[in-house]
Amino acid sequence: MRDGIDRLLDILEAIEGIERYTVRGRDAFLQDELVQVWMVHHLQIIGEAASRLPSNLRNTSPGVPWKQVIGLRNILVHAYFRVDPEEVWAVVDHDIPAIRAEVVALLSLLGGTGDAG
């Protein structure tokens, strides 16, 4: 069974997948549907892994809006026709770096491989 560290590593790996393409910038993201799908897929992974994190771990890192992270996953999966690429970009550009920092700190605290990146 996967534990909290495994879930945090899943989140970090998905963030790294997103970061591979955010370096190309907003315009490249908006012009490339394949990159948009890639980012949405990785945001779904982040939300799914977050939903399976033990609540005590989520409470250890109140700087991450876990409820919104999980909620975004639900929107991306169940209301995909409402997904706005501009909003996806805003999340990956603004929120993902902060979430990454919190996840790395949590992994370091737990003795996981928080030095990724």
Image (cartoon, grey):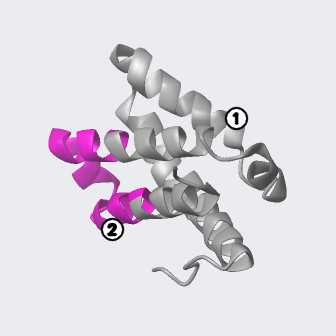
Residue 110, image x, y percentages: 71, 73
Q: Identify the residue at horizontal 63%, vertical 62% (top origin).
A: 98
Give the mark nearest the N terminus, 2 or 1: 2
Q: Residues within 10 Å of mark 1 (few under 14, many from 20)?
A: few
Please state if 71 lies on the left or on the right of 93 as rendered. right
Q: Main secondary structure of the magenta part?
A: helix
Give percent across and percent down for residue 72.
Answer: 54, 31
Q: Which amino acid is tagged 1?
A: Lys
Spot occupied by residue 73 in the image (x, y as percentages of width and height):
49, 32
- Relative to the observer, which residue lies in front, 18 or 94? 18
Residue displayed at 33% across by 61% down: 17
Label 2 crowd bin: few (<14), some (14–19), many (20+), radius 10 Å: few
The kind of secondary structure element at disc 2 is loop
Vertical side of 17 occupied by 52: above or below: above
Q: Which residue is mark 2?
A: 23
Q: Residue sitting at 49 percent across and 47 percent down?
A: 46
Which one is closest to the eye, mark 2 or mark 1?
Answer: 1
Question: What residue type is disc 2 on?
Answer: Val
Q: Is residue 67 above or below residue 55?
A: above
Q: Which residues are magenta?
A: 14-40
Q: What residue does disc 1 label?
A: 67
- What number is the disc on residue 3? none
Asked whether the beta carbons under mark 2 and mark 1 sit within 8 Å of each other, the answer is no
